[in-house]
Image (cartoon, rainbow, N blue to C red):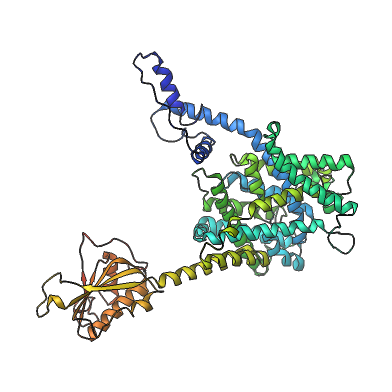
Amino acid sequence: LFPGRGGALFSAANNNNNDEAEVEQPEPSPSRLESVVENSKLLRPFRGSFGGGNNNNSSFFDATAAAADAVSSAPRSLAAGLAVSLAMIPEAVAFSFVAGVNPLVGLRTTVVLGFVAASIGSRAGVCSSSSGACSVVVASLGLSHGPSYLSAAALLAGLLQIAGGGAAGLGRFVRLVPHPVMLGFVNGLACVMTRAQLVHFRDASTTGAFLDPRTAAGGAMYGLTLATMALARIIPRVPYLKRIPPSLGAVAASTFLSRALNLPVRTLADVAGADTFRGGFAAALPRIGLPPGVPLLSDPFGTLRIILPYAVTMAAVGSIESLLTVQLLDGMADDGERGSTRRECVAQGLGNVASGLTGGIGGCALLGQSIINVESGGGASRLSGMSAALFLGIGIAAAAPLLGEVPIAAFVGVMLLVCRSTFSWSSLRVLGKIPRLDALVIALVSFVTIRDDLAKAVVAGTIASALGFAWKQSTNIDAVPSTASSSSAVPGRKKDQWKSYNLRGPLFFGSTRKFSTLFDVHSDPDDVVLDFSECRVVDHSALQAINDLADRYGKAGKRVHLRRLSKNCAELLDRLHGGAGGKGKGGGKGGLPPYEVVESDPVSDPVYDVTLKRNA
């Protein structure tokens, strides 16, 4: 039974007794893409049971099949959540060190934020945690005022995400992010994640230099990392192991190998400290309440003055990274569904509020862990993201000593594979085939992401792309002169004296300067036609340029006929000349002067609005 097909099966069963029943011809096999899209639709819980339609039998079969699919996918979602929870541990610990707090704080943040965001987020498969981008932003705040102020900043950042991205809908502007910016984002993020893994290959006990692979410690670290990467690639190819998430199987095998061979490798307990993995519910359960030591109630304005700049930056960085992650997962899933920006911002905001109230440092959706989740089979249900947080919390409470024995090399190998899959290698192959501006934007966003943070990188890349687009469009305006005839008799003027300019390209603030140079006012005849059939008037600057050109012809004693303008554009031209019955520039009645004539044709005139705020 499959959603959307139960009705057909039911009807076929009822028609078996008909002697003249029609035999359906088999449909051609769908393409691979169509199969992926169709299968992804089958995973939606209770598809069709709440929708329209008059086929009650089909709805019944749809609900039954969807429930069966949800139950059948639960074990894989739980396994994917377990794999993600293991992969989140080293990153959460590393980001805790970046923010200057105890590793347990980062782990608690991952549990609380991950569960809340996954349960109400806009797309299944998104995994949230304490992040490097947010930790870098608030590191100086923690250094100067203490860890409690980090929780207060996370609390305020969550409220800003709810108000700005959720209520005000500012998150929808992420659609303005160009594709080269997306490529630069993933490339820069892959480099940042790779750089974060390199610290594990350094000798922490001496000079901090990279481990020598000829030594026992270096050979074990490099060898176990490579073994984990190889196992993660081999496991999906083994028929009996296909159902095991590759990263989970690779981590488990590497841990067993290190224990069996007694390899001299560092474990999670060695990096985070033995107290972090001592276990017990006292270590796992956080304290709920306002951050201690922060005068949020006694001195709200003073506290706000300290944490507001950090909270605004954290909210922007977290929202951008989360929404870009959702967009990338939309493309990976290819199921026709698109995550809601408002819902994702609200989910991340509530997660950060909960993190701040439990002593956390805040965070956002993580692309690397989300990719692990989707590739491990967790993209079909929210259960994977929620279970990842729960498994991590249970692990801290019940199995912390066991988690502490997992070698760092195993997680490093998994994350290096994630970095490899995150980086857009195709962007390197097309560098010589795409416009130079797009290649520059990719490099710019990647560089700023690595050097500063994601928010600055996306803003810089978007501005560069917008300016480049405006410059290119500003050079596309052109006018083709030809002979024209009058649309109505004009006393004292000959038809052969008319000249037409067929305008092509967009007319906006960037092209108005070139537009004004396309006409020979002194040599043109007494009547000139401006045909806007292939030209789009975009903004106020374009309207002003048209009026200024008409004024130039008017001073020369000539008349301009404007054709193929939208009704909205003609009305706004009239308003700019003091319309609504007033006296215009040319001294005539109405808005437009007598030398500027708009020839309307409801049949052939285009229909569009100019981006100009009209008066009420």
Q: Is residue 97 above or below residue 448?
A: above
Q: Is residue 29 above or below residue 528?
A: above
Q: Quadrant of residue 25?
A: top left
Q: Is residue 22 above or below residue 536?
A: above
The foreground one among 233 and 145 is 233
Q: How many marks?
A: 0
Image quadrant for the C terminus? Answer: bottom left
Please indicate whether residue 473 sits to the left or right of residue 253 in the image. Answer: left
Please indicate whether residue 411 sits to the left or right of residue 310 in the image. Answer: right
Horizontal and vertical percent for residue 179?
53, 59
Q: Can the viewer see residue 614 in this picture? A: no
Horizontal and vertical percent for residue 384?
64, 41
Horizontal and vertical percent for residue 225?
78, 49
The foreground one among 299 and 180 is 180
Q: Quadrant of residue 565?
A: bottom left
Q: Can the viewer see residue 314 in this picture? A: yes
The foreground one among 399 and 193 is 193
Horizontal and vertical percent for residue 460?
57, 68
Residue at 39% of width from left, 24% of height from top? Answer: 24
Residue at 34% of width from left, 80% of height from top? Answer: 517
